[in-house]
Amino acid sequence: MHTEGHDMGKPEGVEAHPSPKRDSEHPGYETQDVSVGGVTTFLVGLGGSVIIFFFFCFAMGKAINYALIRHDGPEDKWHTSVTLGATSHGEKREDLTSSATMEQRQLQQMTQVFPTPRLETDDGNQDVADLHAREDLLLNYYSSSPDLAAGTVRIPIERAMQLIVERGLPKAPATPQSTTLMAGEATPTVTAPLTDGFARTGYELQTIETRKEKNEFNRAEAKQ
């Protein structure tokens, strides 16, 4: 005996599942339509909950901002808010393209509102370059300064070295040896250093090279 249906292929001796009951109360399909009123009520309730939650978050944000302003006090030159992506006047910038240079400039503006002394933001590269630039002005150019004696002018170090070579240095008066040398010791001899002890940093060398290339490019453009 062969049986067709969803029990087809079962081994013999296994009881087949009974067929579902079919009558007027169980026709085997939905006899009612979807409740439009119930769906509408759910959607309206969901939308109302979202709106209420939005106004709740907005009110909480206003309350938190008011508490922060009340705690920090009014803005002054030390507490000026600078927002990334905005101009110095607080206006929204039209070009919001991500740029490392732009972000660095904005960060520099933010750090300027803090009182000195400030932490270094570039590992001291610019500070060292500024120090060497001031030293170059003092060592390589003629200048006068209020801290010098009247009628005294500071001359370039190269010119000063030439004058020393020409005129020599005044010799200090010879003083008798005040210390007794031990066996095997000798009077130390002062020799000229191998270098002048000054070296540019990598940041300065890169800046100087970039400036040199820019000047050469500008000169080439001017000749055309």
Image (tube, rainbow, N blue to C red):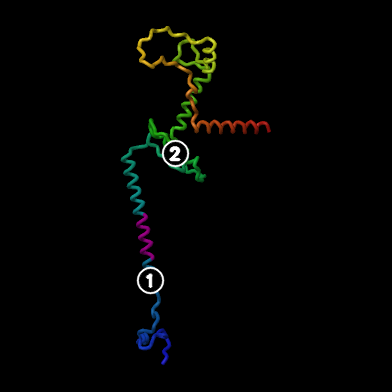
As measured in the structure, the alpha-carbon distance from the residue carrying label 2 to the one carrying label 1 is 56 Å
Front of the two marks 2 and 1: 2
**Placement of 213 over or under 25, stated as above or below:** above
Callout 1: SS: helix
First in sequence: mark 2 vs mark 1: 1
Q: Residue furthest bottom?
A: 1
Q: Residue at x 38, y 9 (%)?
A: 177
- Give the residue pinned by disc 2: 107
> 12 or 203, which lies in front?
12
Tell me the residue at 50%/20% (across/down): 139
Q: Which residues are magenta?
A: 43-54
Name which residue lies at 48% across and 29% down. 129
Q: What label does residue 118 carry, if any?
A: none
Which residue is at 39% across, 16% downward? 185
The secondary structure making up most of the magenta span is helix
The N terminus is located in which quarter? bottom left
Q: Position of residue 169 (x, y in %)?
A: 48, 10
Residue nearer the viewer, 4 or 160: 160
Q: Is residue 50 magenta?
A: yes
Which residue lies under the disc numbered 1?
A: 37
Q: Few, some or many C-alpha atoms within 10 Å of disc 2 (few <14, some 14-19, many ≥20)?
A: some
